[in-house]
Amino acid sequence: MDYRILYHPRVDSEDIPILPDTIKRRVKRAIDDRLVTYPDLYGKPLRKGLHRFRKLRIGDWRIVYRIDDKDVIIFIIAHRAKIYQHVFERV
């Protein structure tokens, strides 16, 4: 069962442009290989205020997303040191 990937508007305008090229390729591959097919298997559930969300780790970078039926909504892609400072602005 394939899931449809949807992006928060700020992912395209703010997150993806600042990623290094090697990380962009790794993120794209992770989304295509993991989140499209089995987002619940690969992503780790978050806790407390983000309990409805999951994260996918790609080296030092994180993708925070939520699964809604057959949609995977990506809210933020950021470095692990900064992601939790900005995730609450988008959810």
Image (cartoon, grey):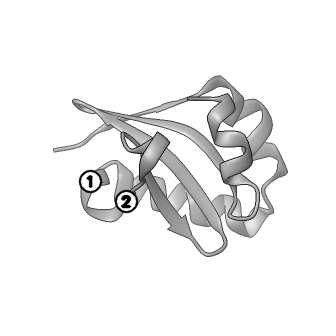
SS for tag 2? Answer: loop
SS for tag 1? Answer: helix
Q: In which quarter of the image is residue 91?
A: top right
Residue corresponding to mark 2: 43
Q: Amino acid type of disc 1?
A: Asp
Quadrant of the rendering where the N terminus is positioned: top left
In this view of the protein, which residue sits in the foreground, 90 or 17? 90
Q: Residue shown at 70%/29% (left/top)?
A: 10
Above or below, comparing residue 54 to residue 75 in the picture: below
Residue corresponding to mark 1: 40
Residue 82 shown left or right of residue 30 in the figure? right
In this view of the protein, which residue sits in the foreground, 61 or 82? 82
Residue, far front: 48
Whole-angstrom CA distance, mark 2 to mark 1, is 6 Å
Residue, far top: 9
**Circles 2 and 1 in contact, beta carbons < 8 Å:** yes
